[in-house]
Structures are given as C-alpha cells and as structure tokens.
Image (cartoon, rainbow, N blue to C red):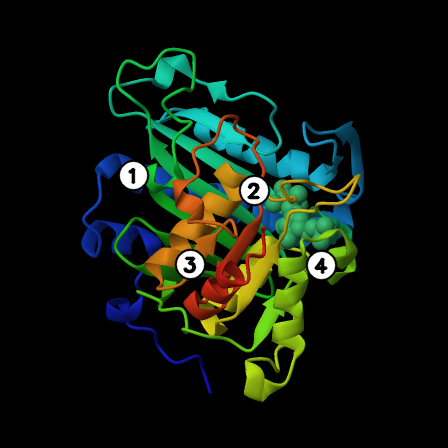
Amino acid sequence: MANPFVKYSSLITLDRYLRTRQQIDPGLIVTLEQVALAVKRVAHELAGAALKGGFGHSGSINVHGERVEKLDEWSNNVFVDTFSGGGPVCTLISEEMEEPRHARAQCTNDSYALLYDPLDGSSNTDINGALGTIFAVRRRRPGHGEGIEDVLAAGSAQIAAGYALYGPATMLVWTAGDGVNAFVLDRGIGEFVLWQEKIRMPERGKTYAVNQANAARWNPGTRALIERLCGPKAEGGGYSLRYCGAFVGDFHRCLLNGGLFFYPSEVTAGGAPKGKLRLMYEVAPLSMLAEHAGGAGSTGRGRALEVVPERIHERVPVYIGSAEEVALAVKLKVEG
Ligand code: AHG
Ligand code: MN
Ligand code: MN
C-alpha cells in the first residue's frame, strides 16, 4: 500500500503556521525560522556523529567548570554561524560562551537577544541518549550599548521560548505567548510539520524526575517530597521515577503526561548551593512553556519567571511540571 497522499491542507509546516496561525512580529517569525534551521543542522550532525568521530571531549572546560563535549562546541558554532549572517537577533547568550556575543552591525531598535543551551543533556552524547536544545527570545532595549543590563530581567520578559528534543523523532516545541505548539521534523521533506498545538499539561502526573543519588545533600523538605511521592498511593504517592539525564527529555514527558522534574539546591559542604540548572537559558524558557501549558515552574520558593538574574550564567533550584506537584513541593518547603 503506497503512503497515503498527504493533502496540502494538512501539511502545516512551521513556516505556514507562523504566517497564518500566529499574530507575531515578522522579526520573531524570522528568528524562530532561524532557530528551526539551526536545530535541523544539529539534528543532522547528531544522527551521523558516531560515524564521523564526533563523540568525545572537546578538550576544553566551560565557564561552569564542566567538560565541553565536541558536540556541545559544534552545536554552539551552528547557532553562532546561523545568527551571524544577519537577521533581527543582535545578541547571543549561550551556555557555552562565557560572555554574550554582540553583532553591532545587526543592531536596530527592534533587535532581539537569543539565549540558548545549544546541547542539553551532554552526558548522553556518546551513548545515543536523549539530547535537546533550549532557547528563549527577549527584546533588546532600543539604543542598548555593548552592555546587557536590559537583558538581565526576569523570565517574564521572554517573548518566546522553546526546545528541540533529539530523540527517535526530532521535535520542536515552542510558545510565543499563544499556546504551546509541537512540530515534528519530517526528514523526507526537511520540514517541521505541526503535530500538536495549544498543548495542555495534565494537572497531575504519575512520574517524577530527579537525580536521587544527590539526596544526602538536599534540604529536609526535598527529602520529605521524595517520601511523599514514593509513599502509598492513597496518601498521594505511588509515583514512578523516570530520569533521562537531559532536562529537555524529562520536561517533555511532564508536558505530555504530567509529573514533576526537579533539580534541588544542595546544602551540604561541597554541594551545589543553587542546584545545577541555569536560569536564563534552561529554567526560564521551560518555565514559560510550563506556565503556558497550564503547569508551573518554581525555584521551590516562588515563580521561576520572577527571578531577576545578576549574571547570565546564574543557577537556580528548579521544580517544574504539573501544577499539583509543583504546589506540593512549595508547600513542603523543599528549599527551606
Ligand atoms: P547540559 O548538558 O546542558 O549541561 O545540561 C545537563 C543538565 C540537564 O540537562 C540534566 O537534567 C542535568 O544536567 C543532569 O545533571 P546530573 O547529571 O547531575 O543529574
Ligand atoms: Mn542544559
Ligand atoms: Mn548544554
């Protein structure tokens, strides 16, 4: 049986969707299309990296003191290359670059900043595990200089945010403020095609995602949360643990099935006092998606989208996913 004929009317490509189903600035349309192009380039590289010796350590250490994998570097270079050829983005802020990159020649009064984690879940690069890209778009203040004071604002200033998930399928999930929309890459035609729009996150889920090996370093409230989730179903427990090592992969599960992801602060000596995840290009973008899908993104004390960063690589504890589980975490004073 030949493939069923897909009518043009049902072939809603990203480009068509942006121009017909969303009321967004033309500059933001261009920016989201540039993100989609960069994501396609990364997806293609990831699919062939094993064959081209693309795995392994690049030899460098990033600003966070973490090993930079070859694919981290490669993915970041794709974004720098894609956004340096003109367009409405004049500023790039990347997990893999210590300082912001400002293309003065691309500055106008309507310029944007793109904040991104080019490859999320780097411990999975060499084992063919889930990987992602996370991004957020913010407006630059007209007449901004070489500084980024105007960008160091709460996540509520984001005008768009999203992620790519490189799994069996490559998916692009984003919001520009009017619903959370998911597109799947049709490799046959090289287009992102609409899969689901205005996704709603279930109020409650059946799974939680955390690196439980760190439990000895957590606040008592965080351990109380684990006890509740692992306790009897009749007392609000009965959850299963699902943790894939990539924030994007664990968040995508929460978006579709409900549930909770958390990366707590670590209060013992030698622990990570603010947890591991970075506010501006991991927690704030996914918190915007969570809220626009009816879920929540919290630092354990308050809305993640209200945290005003002092530095671009600032970390925060994060509890994100279904509204009920995030509310439970806050009620249990997971962050003291
Ligand atoms: P990145 O690869 O961009 O540094 O992000 C990895 C993050 C996040 O994706 C994941 O949830 C978390 O690190 C896993 O951390 P642990 O290995 O400490 O569990
Ligand atoms: Mn990451
Ligand atoms: Mn990364």
Residue labelled with disc 3: 296
Q: Badge 1 local density, few (<14 within 10 Å), some, or many (20+)?
A: many
Q: Which mark is residue 140?
A: none
Q: Quadrant of ligand 3?
A: top right
Q: Which mark is residue 316?
A: 2
Residue labelled with disc 4: 211
Q: Is 197 positioned to the left or the right of 262 in the image?
A: left
Residue 82 visible in this rendered orientation of the protein: yes
Q: Is 176 positioned to the left or the right of 98 in the image?
A: left
Query: Is ligand 1 within 8 Å of the beta carbon of the residue shown at mark 4?
Result: yes
Q: Badge 4 local density, few (<14 within 10 Å), some, or many (20+)?
A: some
Which of pointers 1 and 2 indicates the residue nearer the eye? 2
Name the N-terminal-most of marks 1 and 3: 1
Q: CA distance from mark 4 to mark 2?
A: 16 Å
Q: Is 110 positioned to the left or the right of 147 in the image?
A: left
Q: CA distance from mark 1 to mark 4?
A: 36 Å
The answer to the question of whether label 2 and label 3 lie on touching residues, with beta carbons closer than 8 A, is: no
328 w.r.t. 192: above or below: below
Of the residues shown, which amino acid type is indicated by label 4? Asn
101 w.r.t. 81: above or below: above
